[in-house]
Image (cartoon, rainbow, N blue to C red):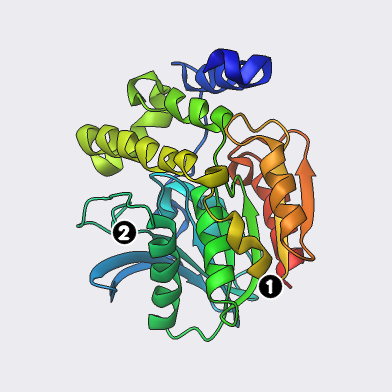
Amino acid sequence: MVAVLGGRGVLRLRLLLSALKPGIHVPRAGAAAAFGTSVTSAKVAVNGVQLHYQQTGEGDHAVLLLPGMLGSGETDFGPQLQNLDKKLFTVVAWDPRGYGHSRPPDRDFPADFFERDAKDAVDLMKALKFKKVSLLGWSDGGITALVAAAKYPSYIHKMVIWGANAYVTDEDSMIYEGIRDVSKWSERTRKPLEALYGHDYFARTCEKWVDGIRQFKHLPDGNICRHLLPRVQCPTLIVHGEKDPLVPQFHADFIHEHVKGSRLHLMPEGKHNLHLRFANEFNKLAEDFLQ
C-alpha cells in the first residue's frame, strides 16, 4: 500500500498520526449546554428510531448541522450553536442514529448508510415542521448533505460542506486505517468521545466505521456519491482547509467540478476541523452564503 501511495500519501498519514499522538490536541467543541439555556434538546421518533437533536434561534431560515464520524451536535458544533445568528436562523444539530444520544440502536454501516442518514435527516426536519432547510455538513455529514441535496432537491434550500469526499481512493483507505486504533489518539481528543460513548462502544464503533467507509473502495471508482453530484440543484459552498490531513484537496475540487454552480473557498491554515479552529471566520462565511 505504501509503495502504491507514494510520498504524498505517506506524508499525509504521518501528519494524521502526529495529530493523534498524546499531548497534541485536535480541538472538538464542548457541550452546547455550556453556552447557555438558549439551546434546547429533545428526541423525536423518525423511521423507527428516536433521534436526538438540539435547537436554537428563532429565524425563518432553518439550518441543519450534520456531524462527522462518531460525532454529535454537542461534540461537533458548539461554536455554531452558540454564535450563528439566532435572529436570522433556526439552527438544529442532530445526532445520526447510533451516534451521540440517538441510541439505541448501536451504530452500523450497511452499504447504504449515507442514504439512510440522508433520509433520517430530511425526515427529522419534516417531523419538526420545517418546510425547507439549508444544510451545513462536516466530513461524513458533508457526504450525507450531498446525498440529501441530490435525492430531495425540492426540500434543500442551500448547502455548505467541508471535509467531504464523493469517492474513496487507496490514499484515503490508508488514512482511514491510521485512525482505526483509538488508543493512538491524543487523550484530549479521545476523552470527550469516551465520556459520551464509553471506551468500548467508542473503540468498537470507530473500527466499524473504518470498515464501513473502506467498503466503498471496492465499488467502481470507489464511488460513495459521485453519481449523485450532477443531481444537486441547490446553491452549494464547498470549504476546504488546505492543511487537512484527512481529506486531500482533490476531493473538494472534484465536488466543485461536478456540482453545477458550486463555489469553492480555500482556507490556507484550515485543517479538518476548520469550523472549530477558525469558528468566527467560518460562521461569517456560512452566514453570508446562506443569506
Asked if residue 287 is positioned above or below residue 171 in the image, the reply reads below
Residue 272, picture quadrant:
top right
Residue beneath disc 2: 97
For the residues labelled 1 and 2, the Cα–Cα distance comes to 26 Å
Q: Position of residue 59 (x, y in %)?
A: 60, 79
Q: Position of residue 4 (x, y in %)?
A: 59, 18
Residue 234: which disc? 1
Asked if residue 194 shows in the view, the reply is no
Residue 168, picture quadrant:
top right
For label 1, the crowd category at 10 Å Cα-Cα, with few meaning under 14, some 14 to 19 and many 20 or more, is many
Asked if residue 222 shows in the view, the reply is yes
Residue 53: which disc? none
Out of 128 and 152, give the one closest to the viewer: 152
Is label 1 in a helix, a strand or a loop? loop
Residue occupying image coordinates x 33% and y 21% = 183
Q: Is residue 251 left or right of residue 263?
A: left
What's the amino acid at mark 1? Cys
Point out the image quarter for the C terminus: bottom right
Q: Is residue 113 left or right of residue 17?
A: left
- Nearer the N terminus, badge 1 or badge 2? 2
Q: Position of residue 24 (x, y in %)?
A: 51, 20
